[in-house]
């Protein structure tokens, strides 16, 4: 009996792993299509307004030629914005350093491998799809919900919203914890009509499906 249970568990875990890999592979294939050698695209990590320097994650662009082979290492650059830099939105509207938010997708010229020496000649704030703005919240697995506990930056979630939260959840879910960032490219508090933190958000692969500040209501929703 014990061996059968172990065998079933391994089979279930293997199936989940295969599904996750397939979904991730499809997502990576779609995202890789937008990356070209002469268009260095990345996501803003930090903005140092005092020194006019922007830290940009260019991992996906750096790995653009690797096909379906993905690795965990990250790549970033520090791009200095000077008076000579063309800083604008994708529609050519002029932008300022204060318009650059964390998570913003940007295009930087020249590319890293074509003369980039730390100073951006062009720094373009690109339009972003809803999927790109909510990438960190949406579930990446077709039939698995992503439970997100969002809390005020600098604070920690209460005990009932940490790992203990998963103990009473029987169905297969993914869970993440993230602070609310006021300077993020999208204001989740406003967009999701969040009245107070911490809050529990439940997403499928396309949208928010449930929101609550009470753990008991989450359990009831997942029954």
Image (spheres, rainbow, N blue to C red):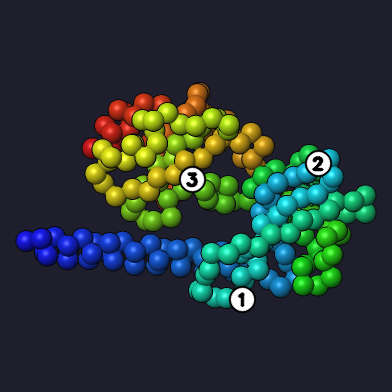
Depth check, front residue: 189 or 7? 7
Instruction: Tell me: 49 left or right of 203.
Output: right
- Which residue shows up at 43% across the image and 55% down it? 140
Q: Are marks 2 and 1 in contact (CB under 8 Å)?
A: no
- Which residue shows up at 10% across the image and 60% down it? 2
Q: Are marks 1 and 3 in contact (CB under 8 Å)?
A: no
Q: Does label 1 or label 3 sit earlier along the sequence?
A: 1
Residue 65: numbered disc:
1
Residue 137: numbered disc:
3
Residue 49: numbered disc:
2
Label 2 packing within 10 angstroms: few (<14), some (14-19), many (20+): few
Q: Does label 3 or label 2 sit earlier along the sequence?
A: 2
Badge 3 element: loop
How far is disc 2 from disc 1 in space, using C-alphas? 33 Å
Q: Does label 2 or label 1 sit earlier along the sequence?
A: 2
- Which residue shows up at 38% across the image and 48% down it? 174
Return the x and y of residue 85 as percentages of the image width and height: 88, 54
Badge 2 element: loop
Return the x and y of residue 157 as percentages of the image width and height: 46, 31
Judge whether residue 154 can be spotted in this image: yes
Instruction: Tell me: 5 left or right of 209.
Output: left
How far is disc 3 from disc 2 in space, using C-alphas? 27 Å
Judge whether residue 91 can be spotted in this image: no
Depth check, front residue: 23 or 44? 44
In the image, is residue 8 above or below residue 83? below
């Amino acid at each position: 009996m014990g061996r059968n249970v172990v065998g079933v568990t391994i089979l279930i875990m293997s199936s989940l792993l295969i599904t996750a890999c397939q979904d991730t592979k499809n997502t990576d294939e779609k995202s890789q299509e937008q990356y070209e050698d002469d268009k260095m695209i990345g996501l803003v990590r930090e903005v140092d307004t005092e020194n006019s320097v922007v830290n940009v994650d260019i991992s996906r662009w750096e790995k653009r030629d690797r096909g379906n082979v993905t690795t965990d290492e990250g790549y970033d650059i520090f791009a200095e914005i000077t008076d000579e830099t063309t800083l604008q939105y994708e529609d050519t509207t002029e932008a300022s350093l204060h318009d650059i938010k964390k998570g913003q997708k940007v295009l930087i010229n020249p590319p890293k491998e074509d003369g980039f020496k730390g100073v951006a000649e062009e720094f373009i704030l690109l339009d972003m799809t809803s999927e790109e703005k909510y990438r960190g919240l949406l579930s990446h697995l077709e039939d698995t919900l992503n439970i997100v506990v969002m809390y005020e930056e600098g604070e920690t979630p209460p005990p009932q919203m940490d790992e203990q939260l998963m103990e009473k959840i029987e169905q297969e879910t993914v869970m993440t914890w993230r602070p609310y960032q006021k300077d993020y490219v999208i204001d989740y508090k406003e967009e999701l009509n969040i009245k107070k933190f911490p809050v529990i958000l439940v997403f499928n692969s396309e949208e928010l499906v449930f929101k609550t500040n009470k753990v008991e209501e989450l359990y009831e929703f997942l029954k």
